[in-house]
Image (cartoon, rainbow, N blue to C red):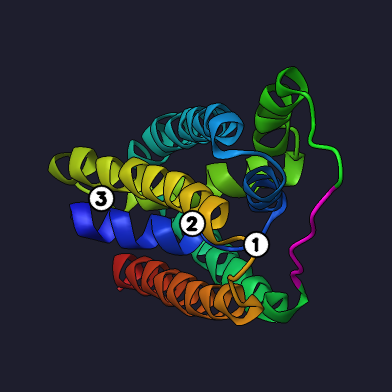
Amino acid sequence: MYLRGLLLSIALVSSIGMQNLFLFNNAINQKLSRAWPVTIMIWIADTALTLAAFFGMGAIISSHELFKLIIMFLGGVLVIWIGFGILRSAASFKLESANTPLPMKKSLVNAWVVTWANPQALIDTSLMFGALRGSLTDSQVTPFITGVISATGIWFFGITLLLGLLKERLPQKFLLWVNILSGVVVMGYGCYLLWQAVMMVI
């Protein structure tokens, strides 16, 4: 179950969105010594949002069977749509370097903004992790969410290190294939949630 949470979270967090754009450009435009504090703040903000969605919405869902069925179905559709969106936008991402890096204080504030200031992302995260929580037994919750949080840490810190060291030589196709793989994995898990919803009805 830990590995399931780890793999799913890697697939989700590696998709190119507002948060990753900020993460990538932070690593590209700043020295590693300045990039690390911002990366830590991104991980803290993301972990806080994930835990709020998983144990907030997820706890409500898991205690009401009908609500659980509805949200698992909607969550499955949403996850498939997110995966499709990842695939559709895979080739459109471009790394850019800025001449002047953001001041540290502004960078730290922006780490929270790119995670929490998108209302649609908040709704999507709540539905998605709520549906995931509803599909787990109580004994599966801790290893699964530990895997999720571990994966985001591996991704955020790994990408910061990779881009910080290799930003001049990293091929654009690397990010293209990261997105393609992410989209396929996310869509697959969405289908799994829909299958579980169907099994609840049957």
Q: Is residue 197 left or right of residue 18?
A: left
Residue 110, how many percent across, how many down?
73, 30
Residue 65 in view of the camera: no
Residue that protrudes farthest toward the left in the picture: 139
Bounds of the magenta span? 93-98
Residue that protrudes farthest toward the top in the picture: 105
The dot on residue 162 is 2
Within-10-Å neighbours for mark 2: few <14, some 14–19, many 20+: some
How many angstroms separate mark 1 from mark 2 (CA)? 16 Å
| Residue 96 falls in image quadrant | bottom right
Q: Main secondary structure of the magenta part?
A: loop
Q: Is residue 99 left or right of residue 36?
A: right
The dot on residue 136 is 3
Q: Earlier in the sequence, mark 1 or mark 3?
A: 1
Q: Is residue 74 left or right of residue 202?
A: right
Q: Amino acid at mark 3?
A: Leu
Q: How many marks?
A: 3
The dot on residue 16 is 1
176, above or below 64, in the image? below
Quick one: 135 or 14, which is closer to the camera?
14
Q: Amino acid at mark 1?
A: Ile
158, above or below 184, in the image? above
Q: Is residue 116 left or right of residue 179?
A: right
Whether residue 94 appears in magenta in the rendering, the answer is yes
Quick one: 134 or 1, which is closer to the camera?
1
| Residue 51 falls in image quadrant | top left
174, above or below 193, in the image? below
Q: Secondary structure at mark 1?
A: loop
Within-10-Å neighbours for mark 1: few <14, some 14–19, many 20+: many
Identify which residue is drawn at 25% across, 47% down: 144
